Image (cartoon, helix red, strand yellow):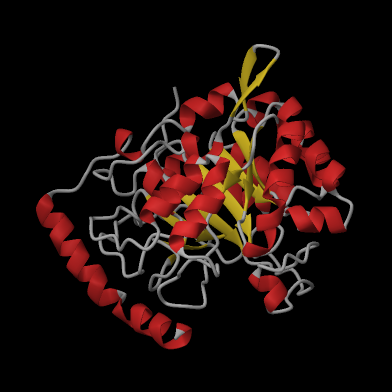
Amino acid sequence: MDKVKRFIDCTYTATKCNLRCQYCYITQENKWNEELPKLKYSPEIIGEVLSQERLGGVCHINICGLGETLIPAEMVDIIYNILKQGHYVMIITNGTITKRFEAIAKFPKEYLERLSFKFSFHYEELLRLNMMDKFFANIKRMYDAGASFSLEITPHDGLIDKIDEIKQVCLDNVGAVCHVTVARDASKTAIPILTDLSKEEYIKTWGSFDSDMFRFKMSTFGVKRKEFCYAGDWTGYLNLVTGILKPCYYTYGGQNIFEYINKPIKFEAMGYCHLSHCYNSHAFLTMGAIPELDSPVYLKMRDRVVVKDGKESHWVQPKMRKFLSTKLVESNKEYTKGRKRFLKVKNFVKNFPVKVYLKITKN
């Protein structure tokens, strides 16, 4: 059975999107139609530099655009070439670009069983644009082809009076209600919840979806992480346009892992985190970036059980289910206490300018 060696969160720095969700920063900043950035490296090169040999083993590769991930035509080839390396890939998408799903559905079966989609459920926009049937048809298309999926909604106050109908639409189309993430205000240093509700009201309202993702994110949201974090070694944040790999979202420097294919990648844990909290804890912490932290496996954040005619099925298919049940510590060796202490101090000093910059620009 494959076990996760590293989690690489990849971004495609394009804000172009075909939806206009009111809670999205792209809408707020009017960035829907900005030109797509030109890739410096071909999809074939991207696949080669992310080989198992170079990354140390089988990895979980997450791909998300700043806008809609599947708008760039080359994204299909990027996904194909990363799957070719034997990794497990998850794509974040709004589920509306049908021609991309039609192309991906033609991938070999052994690729599709290592592929999963996190379908973002932008309910109001799908209704406005009359895309609801298309959205769920694309989910079914990928599931029938052998890929896994998860359905997730971003909670915002404008949807509260539509919660019951949202649940029913999910039940009618995918057999279970969607998972719920936590909306955040990224304009502020504390990265608070984006809502006019109190925390108690927020939990009561959106907790009705019985989502493991929502429960875990709320249990860690706003909690400063003081433990040793293996971001930079066991996990990384990769820009697919520039090839720059960083330990995490807001960290100093980085290394270009695309430019010199044969040059070893330097993996070294950050240890110290200067952010107010791990706002994407549902991925990094459930996969085990902080191994001593008691957390569910990542599978719990994505899967749902569907019971129909007395038969049970899952959103996440068998091979992907096993992989998403593994943790990073199973394939990696923990550092000594001395090395942990050294790296926490080293990276606190190294990234202090970033912390100051964020405080100045977000307050």
Residue appearing at x 29%, y 56% in the figure:
269
Q: Nearer the viewer, residue 119 or 45?
A: 119
Q: What is the x, y in percent for residue 318?
A: 56, 22
Does residue 73 appear to the left or right of 269 in the view shown?
right
Report how many numbered discs are placed on residues in the image: 0
Seen in the picture, residue 149 relative to 256 is either above or below; the reply is: above
Seen in the picture, residue 12 relative to 99 is either above or below; the reply is: below
Q: What is the x, y in percent for residue 175?
A: 69, 29
Residue appearing at x 57%, y 48% in the figure:
180
Seen in the picture, residue 138 relative to 24 is either above or below; the reply is: above
- Residue that lies at the very extreme toward the top in this rendered image: 310
The quarter of the picture where the C terminus appears is: bottom left
Seen in the picture, residue 363 relative to 241 is either above or below; the reply is: below
On the question of residue 332 being in view, the answer is: yes
Q: What is the x, y in percent for residue 361?
A: 46, 86
- Residue that lies at the very extreme toward the right in this rendered image: 130
Does residue 5 appear to the left or right of 164 in the view shown?
left
On the question of residue 142 being in view, the answer is: no
Q: What is the x, y in percent for residue 98?
A: 84, 45
Q: Nearer the viewer, residue 190 or 235?
A: 190
The quarter of the picture where the N terminus appears is: top left
Q: Quadrant of residue 247?
A: bottom left
Does residue 261 appear to the left or right of 286 in the view shown?
right
Residue appearing at x 74%, y 78% in the figure:
30
Residue appearing at x 66%, y 45% in the figure:
79
